[in-house]
Image (cartoon, rainbow, N blue to C red):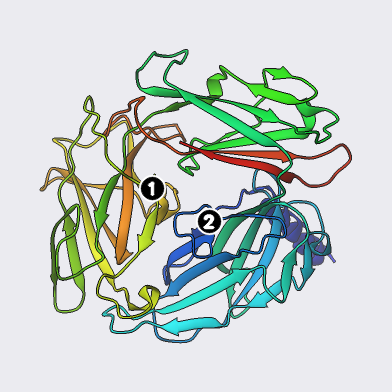
């Protein structure tokens, strides 16, 4: 009897832990690579659909072998903070909660063998009933205690409109290193009983997770509009434009690539060494951290004909940073600061280095420094920070009306 009691307590706290942990798009096993979550046929889009949209969320990933795996998935609804919401599946889905990923193809003429998997939602077996945040958990052999990947996306039912303003005049500096984001939310006749408690807002810069801002309080509230102005939590580092490189061809070096060669087993590429460039803003065209899969020499589908390349990134510096850790930031690692993106210092080279296994295409990245004891990264340590930098801000507006059990997503705005 006591044994069953302990088991019940363990299950309770395990479920509680999952419910309180924010979900993020991430890969959870080394055999999975290049997880992509976007609107179908819109390569640079954020994964956001309107409720009852005719478009689809498209999820793609590679498993690094030619063995056909049995992958299934489960769809969960989340709160505004990406923790698990407290509603049943038949409240947010029509059809089945679980499904199988049956669309797959083996790679063609690649030195790294992989199988490419693809899933679209909604589909004939599953449709969304309500707006909000969603996560798909992907499993192998239906082992639901061991997900191999999770993919986050949002469904919006547009009820409000958002008007943002980005300016260099902040409470910290004028035309310096920072950008102030202000915005208005026009309710457009949409009824909100108590905006101060029912409305939740979340802001991301370049889809970064480390410096996202949640639960912002409006400065002014009227029957028709909420105003967020001069809010110190909405002051962001301007940062600098992203570094970029192109490995879409193995026969000619692309932008940012110093050399590329075949070592007998696979291709290796070395990027031009970067420089610490504080104090020097250089305008460049980037896509704010995103990447795109491409093979200039492909005859058909780039998703199955693109090879994997080992890419070496190098940042020379006389000595390592002893007061924190340096990471590579970008969508290639889902904007996560973990062991897959950390830079290692090489004493012989007097440089930070990192070797990434990446699929052919074009990539953006930045150097993010996290001081000891902090969770928010700064770009200033390596690339500097400038008010002129073109950044993308995404504003999410959620509404949990009085007595409701989930957060509706009633407005989204993208701005640069």
Alpha carbon of mark 2 to alpha carbon of mark 1: how far? 15 Å
Quarter of the image for residue 162 reads top right
The tally of labels here is 2
Name the spot of residue 139 as percent of width and height, x first. Answer: 59, 73
Classify 234 as above or below 285: above
Q: Quadrant of residue 12?
A: bottom right
Q: Which residue is mark 2?
A: 25
Q: Provide residue 238's location: percent of width, then percent of height.
A: 38, 29
Q: Badge 1 is on which residue? A: 289
Which residue occupies the foreground of this view, 129 or 405?
A: 129
The mark lying in front, picked from 2 and 1, is 1
The front one of 102 and 351 is 102
* The C terminus sits in image quarter: top left
Q: Is residue 208 left or right of residue 52?
A: left
In the rendered image, residue 161, in percent from the top left (x then y), is placed at 67, 36
Quarter-of-image position of residue 147: bottom right
Q: Measured from the top left, where is residue 253 in percent x and y? A: 15, 61
> Is residue 41 at least partly visible in the picture?
yes
Q: Left or right of 111: which side holds 396?
A: right
């Amino acid at each position: 009897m006591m044994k069953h009691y302990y088991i019940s307590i363990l299950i309770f706290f395990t479920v509680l832990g999952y419910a309180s942990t924010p979900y993020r798009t991430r890969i959870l096993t080394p055999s999975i690579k290049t997880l992509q979550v976007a609107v179908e046929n819109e390569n640079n889009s954020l994964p956001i659909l309107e409720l009852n949209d005719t478009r689809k969320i498209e999820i793609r990933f590679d498993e690094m072998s030619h063995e056909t795996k049995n992958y299934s998935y489960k769809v969960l609804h989340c709160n505004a903070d990406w923790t698990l919401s407290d509603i049943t599946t038949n409240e947010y889905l029509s059809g089945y909660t679980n499904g199988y990923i049956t669309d797959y193809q083996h790679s063609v003429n690649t030195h790294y063998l992989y199988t490419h998997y693809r899933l679209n939602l909604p589909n004939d077996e599953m449709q969304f009933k309500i707006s909000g945040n969603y996560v798909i958990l992907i499993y192998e052999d239906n082992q639901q205690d061991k997900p191999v990947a999770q993919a986050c996306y949002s469904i919006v039912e547009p009820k409000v409109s958002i008007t943002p303003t980005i300016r260099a005049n902040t409470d910290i500096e004028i035309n310096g290193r920072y950008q102030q984001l202000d915005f208005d939310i026009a309710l457009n006749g949409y009824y909100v009983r108590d905006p101060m408690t029912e409305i939740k807002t979340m802001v991301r810069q370049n889809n970064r997770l480390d410096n996202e801002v949640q639960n912002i309080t409006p400065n002014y509230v009227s029957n028709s509009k909420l105003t967020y102005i001069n809010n110190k939590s909405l002051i962001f580092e301007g940062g600098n434009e992203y570094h970029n490189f192109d490995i879409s061809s193995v026969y000619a070096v692309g932008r940012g690539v110093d050399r590329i060669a075949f070592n007998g087993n696979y291709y290796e590429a070395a990027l031009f060494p970067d420089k610490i460039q504080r104090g020097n803003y250089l305008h460049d065209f980037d896509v704010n951290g995103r990447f795109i899969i491409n093979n200039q020499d492909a005859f058909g589908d780039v998703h199955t004909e693109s090879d994997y390349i080992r890419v070496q990134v190098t940042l020379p510096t006389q000595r390592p940073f002893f007061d924190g850790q340096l990471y590579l930031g970008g969508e290639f690692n889902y904007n996560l600061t973990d062991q897959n993106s950390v830079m290692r210092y090489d004493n012989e080279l007097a440089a930070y280095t990192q070797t990434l296994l990446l699929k052919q295409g074009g990539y953006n990245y930045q150097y993010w420094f996290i001081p000891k004891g902090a969770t928010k990264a700064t770009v200033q340590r390596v690339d500097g920070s400038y008010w002129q930098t073109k950044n993308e801000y995404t504003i999410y507006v959620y509404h949990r009306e009085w007595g409701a059990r989930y957060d509706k997503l009633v407005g989204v705005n993208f701005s640069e």
